[in-house]
Image (spheres, rainbow, N blue to C red):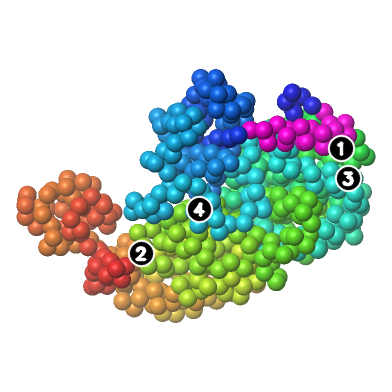
């Protein structure tokens, strides 16, 4: 019987069901896990899953002879994101941990025909240690540093469970925490356990979760609200998305525990509009839990009741800020309130409200199940537990990473992430999303925790980590993020609304080659005003990409102004393309130039007319002979970069 048709009238009934499904799964000799994260779905994961399922159907008799007596649903299942996005679509076999990458619908049948039925290793689908260099293959994902060096708590079920199957969640210790709380813990003890764990909010500010809960309890009036912030809007960040899509039940169980501790009877999950798969999975989870007696009135036959609703954001980045999010739920314009109005006192509908982000909520069941001391044994002195990151940019192994707090940037980027693509020089890493700071190479050994990053001029944020190589212009990076924030600012307060535009204008002036040295001082003064006078965290932290790049890469700003030079060859007004003596006269660049700026005869050196050229860079992209250089400030940028890279 499916769990969706079972109503748990008591905690004992829940335990019996969990024991039953776990015993059934322990009989299985093998599971085939198909990654169905958004990236893999886009590359055909659903078709791969269907091929594997159909093949298993065809070979039921053969499977029984091999003593693989399992139902098709559990032999092959779609899971959430496995983490290593650049290797997808990914299929893993358990319990052998065999790991197949870049699987297609055409070769998915081989996994059944050869790997399952014959016990063969499919060499062509194995992971390469240096994927871009054809290095040694690795059979098991547990032998790959990307996975072996992680410690997953928030991501513990992502890539493991079927996110739509309540039974599968039960089989992986799901709802043990809420059952424990309802049978052997008072609400106060649950709040105490969270406080003792040292868990700090994973949404950006890092405020102690237990302290927030107890603050709400002290001012509690007629009711208190519980909210999950799933409005993850940072460019390059997708940790919360992966959890909501791949493990929705753990998020809801965390909210159940929070509601029990706080005496809340109603709550919301606020999900950004751009996450349709997360919305679908969360809504189905809410419906199944309600039908099973895990949400609603008298949960599991107790006096505890909790009703949960899902609401979607309209795509406004500022609604990731807590008070703006609450206004949005109320149907009002998503604008932040002054910070002296605390949400634990006056939040949703001006009533006490506890808001935590997805990653924070999903840690709660693990803490209650395994204990505060277990969680606090991980991490650093002031930042306990683990932190999930989305590792993106110029790094070899992009994807989801979770490590104990205190691991260094170097370990995350080079040991887990594999280093920089094409082994180019590392230049900077931005942590904390569009309002995060950019840290240079001499900060690679910084431990990653809330306080250390803040002291270095960066921030933890929600966990986005963007890696940059030597071909990145740091002035252009600052300008990009300021431009992003201009479009996302609500415009309510003058320091943010006007400050962002003025900073952008000065940065744009510098990247055009029209800057003056005192423009840097003007930028720093504007940034200081925004930090101290803006209404919410968006405006207060918006200067970080600018102030950190000025702090650590000031010479690049000065080169743009003094020498009209962009050392990375990025800022178009400061560069020009030049065809060098290696040109073979193949005519490819001439044919591809969109403005016909290139002239020359076949097998003769070509020339670019600088008066016509728009510096689009297509000539360099299509040239197979490294015959196109970027010139900036009278210097050949291309050759300098390549020399440094070697």
Q: Which mark is residue 352?
A: none
Of pointers 4 and 2, the one earlier in the residue sequence:
4
Q: Which mark is residue 424?
A: 2
Q: Are marks 1 and 2 in contact (CB under 8 Å)?
A: no
Q: Position of residue 241 (x, y in %)?
A: 60, 46
Of pointers 1 and 3, the one earlier in the residue sequence:
1
Q: Are marks 2 and 3 in contact (CB under 8 Å)?
A: no
Q: Is 561 inside the magenta-drawn segment?
A: no
Mark in front: 4 vs 2: 4
**Alpha carbon distance from label 4 to label 3:** 40 Å
Of pointers 2 and 3, the one earlier in the residue sequence:
3
Mark in front: 4 vs 1: 4
**Alpha carbon distance from label 2 to label 3:** 54 Å
Give the residue number, with chain letter if any, for mark 4.
143
Q: Are marks 4 and 2 in contact (CB under 8 Å)?
A: no
| Quadrant in which the C terminus appears | bottom left
What span is in magenta?
7-28
Of pointers 4 and 3, the one earlier in the residue sequence:
4
How many other residues sit within 10 Å of disc 4, few (<14), some (14-19) or many (≥20)?
some
Mark in front: 1 vs 2: 1
Q: Which mark is residue 11?
A: 1
**Alpha carbon distance from label 4 to label 1:** 39 Å
How many other residues sit within 10 Å of disc 3, few (<14), some (14-19) or many (≥20)?
some
Instruction: From the viewer's side, name the closer residue of 192 and 492.
Output: 192
Q: Label 4's element?
A: helix
Would you say 122 lies left or right of 255 here?
Answer: left
Q: Position of residue 88 (x, y in %)?
A: 46, 42
Q: Are marks 1 and 3 in contact (CB under 8 Å)?
A: yes
**Alpha carbon distance from label 4 to label 2:** 25 Å
**Vertically, is 431 above or below 18?**
below
Give the residue number, with chain letter if any, for mark 3.
182
């Amino acid at each position: 019987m499916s769990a969706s048709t079972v109503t748990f009238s008591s905690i004992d009934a829940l335990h019996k069901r969990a024991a039953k499904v776990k015993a059934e799964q322990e009989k299985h000799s093998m599971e085939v896990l198909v990654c169905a994260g958004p990236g893999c779905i886009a590359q055909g994961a659903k078709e791969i899953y269907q091929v594997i399922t159909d093949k298993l159907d065809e070979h039921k008799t053969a499977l029984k002879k091999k003593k693989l007596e399992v139902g098709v649903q559990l032999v092959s299942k779609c899971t959430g994101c496995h983490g290593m996005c650049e290797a997808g679509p990914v299929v893993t076999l358990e319990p052998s941990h065999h790991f197949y990458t870049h699987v297609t619908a055409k070769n998915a049948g081989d996994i059944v025909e050869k790997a399952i039925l014959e016990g063969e290793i499919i060499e062509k689908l194995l992971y390469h240690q240096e994927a871009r260099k054809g290095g040694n293959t690795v059979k098991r994902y547990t032998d790959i540093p990307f996975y072996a060096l992680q410690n997953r708590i928030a991501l513990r079920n992502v890539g493991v469970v079927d996110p739509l199957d309540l039974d599968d969640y039960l089989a992986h210790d799901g709802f043990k925490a809420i059952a424990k709380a309802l049978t052997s813990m008072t609400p106060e003890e649950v709040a105490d356990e969270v406080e003792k764990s040292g868990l700090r909010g994973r949404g950006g500010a890092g405020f102690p979760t237990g302290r927030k809960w107890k603050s709400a309890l002290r001012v509690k009036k007629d009711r208190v609200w519980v909210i999950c912030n799933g409005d993850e809007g940072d460019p390059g960040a997708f940790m919360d998305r992966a959890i909501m899509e791949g493990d929705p039940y753990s998020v809801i169980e965390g909210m159940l525990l929070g509601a029990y501790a706080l005496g809340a009877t109603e709550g919301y999950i606020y999900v950004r509009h751009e996450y349709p798969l997360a919305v679908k999975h969360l809504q189905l989870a809410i419906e199944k839990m309600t039908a099973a007696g895990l949400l609603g009135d008298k949960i599991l036959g107790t006096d505890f009741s909790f009703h949960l609703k899902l609401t979607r954001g309209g795509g406004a980045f500022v609604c990731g800020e807590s008070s703006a999010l609450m206004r949005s739920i109320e149907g009002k314009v998503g604008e932040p309130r002054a910070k002296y109005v605390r949400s634990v006192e006056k939040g949703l509908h001006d009533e006490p409200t506890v808001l935590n982000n997805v990653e924070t909520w999903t840690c709660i069941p693990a803490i209650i199940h395994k204990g505060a001391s277990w969680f606090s044994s991980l991490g650093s002195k002031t930042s306990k537990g683990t932190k999930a990151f989305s590792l993106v940019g110029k790094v070899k192994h992009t994807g989801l990473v979770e490590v104990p707090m205190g691991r260094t940037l170097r370990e995350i980027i080079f040991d887990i992430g594999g280093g920089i693509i094409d082994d180019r020089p590392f230049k900077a890493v931005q942590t904390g999303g569009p309002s995060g700071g950019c840290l240079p190479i001499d900060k690679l050994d910084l431990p990653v925790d809330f306080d250390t990053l803040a002291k270095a001029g960066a921030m933890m944020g929600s966990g986005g980590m963007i890696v940059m190589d030597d071909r990145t212009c740091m002035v252009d990076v600052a300008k990009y993020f300021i431009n992003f924030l201009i479009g996302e600012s609500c415009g309510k307060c003058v320091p943010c609304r006007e400050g962002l535009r003025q900073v952008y204008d000065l940065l744009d002036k510098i990247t055009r080659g029209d800057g003056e040295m005192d423009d840097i001082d003007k930028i720093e003064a504007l940034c200081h005003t925004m930090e101290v006078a803006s209404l919410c965290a968006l405006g207060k932290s918006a200067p970080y990409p600018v102030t950190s790049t000025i702090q650590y890469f000031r010479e690049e700003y000065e080169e743009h102004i003094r020498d009209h030079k962009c050392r990375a060859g990025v800022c178009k007004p400061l560069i020009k393309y030049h065809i060098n003596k290696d040109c073979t006269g193949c005519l490819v660049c001439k044919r591809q130039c969109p403005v016909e700026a290139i002239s020359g005869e076949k097998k003769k050196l070509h020339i670019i007319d600088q008066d016509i050229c728009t510096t689009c860079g297509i000539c360099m992209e299509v040239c197979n002979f490294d015959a196109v250089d970027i010139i900036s400030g009278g210097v050949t940028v291309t050759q300098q970069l390549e020399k440094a890279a070697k």
